[in-house]
Amino acid sequence: MFQGHVALRPCGFKSHLRHFILAIPVRLMYTMIRDKLNGNKFLMIDQDEFFQREALKQAQQAYEEDEVPIGAVIVSKDRIIAKGHNQTERLQDVTAHAEMIAITSASHGLGSKYLTECTLYVTLEPCLMCATAARWAQISRLVTGTNDPKCGYSLYGSGVLPAKLPVKKELLANECSELLTEFFRSKRESY
Ligand SMILES: [Zn+2]
């Protein structure tokens, strides 16, 4: 019995060869799944989580540019059509919020001021300006990360967004919040 186990255990060159051969389809499969994620044909993870992670990448980019780390993406027909991250410092423009940049970019891309079949993913609850812009743009769905009890649109009551607009809140809220906390902590330490 013991010898049987030894005989079955792969070792040496053959073992390496076996791993190499096995690694090829696994790697190809991984690439295929990764590529198909953008095309939404073989989604292996929650779709909202996938797109919210893309918004988080935008927030991370803002962080690296020393901007308050907030990111947004806009998705139409299961594809990202626009991305944006906060650029208020770089542009010296208080309206250069992630959502505003993404909305403008999406409208340019679609050639339409209305984004009626689009979902806006954003890492922080939008402010009144951005929520109103989303309303004007007729965004069809909103997904938000961490809540913003100081500046979020919710402070202004339930009438800011259309009552029928589907809103999914606090998706990846902890990760979105941690990035902001880390940013402001580093700012305090640098002063
Ligand atoms: Zn805003």
Image: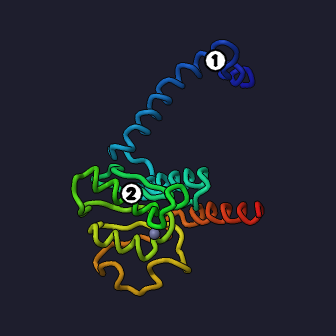
Disc 1 versus disc 2: distance between alpha carbons?
A: 48 Å
Q: Please name which of the two marks, 1 or 2, marks the residue nearer to the observer.
A: 2
Seen at 64% across and 63% down, the residue is: 178
The C terminus lies in quadrant:
bottom right
Most foreground residue, 64 or 79: 64
Is the CB of the residue bearing disc 1 within 8 angstroms of ligand 1? no
Q: Residues within 10 Å of mark 1 (few under 14, many from 20)?
A: few
158 sits left or right of 113 in the view: right
User: In terms of secondary structure, where does tag 1 sit?
Assistant: helix
Marks 1,2: beta carbons within 8 A: no
Please report whichever mark, 1 or 2, sits nearer to the chain's N-terminal start.
1
5 sits left or right of 97 in the view: right
Q: How is the image coloured?
A: rainbow
Seen at 43% across and 47% down, the residue is: 44
Residue at the limit of the structure toward the front, as seen here: 92
x%, y% of residue 162?
A: 30, 79
Q: Residues within 10 Å of mark 2 (few under 14, many from 20)?
A: many
Seen at 59% across and 15% down, the residue is: 17
**Residue marked by disc 2:** 102
Most foreground residue, 13 or 112: 112
Query: Which of the 4 image quadrants contains residue 180?
Result: bottom right
> 13 above or below 43?
above
The N terminus lies in quadrant:
top right
x%, y% of residue 186?
A: 72, 60
User: In terms of secondary structure, where does tag 2 sit?
Assistant: helix
> 170 above or below 42?
below
* Amino acid type of the residue that numbered disc 1 sits on in the rendered structure: His
Judged from the image, the quadrant occupied by ligand 1 is bottom left
Label for residue 16? 1
8 sits left or right of 118 in the view: right
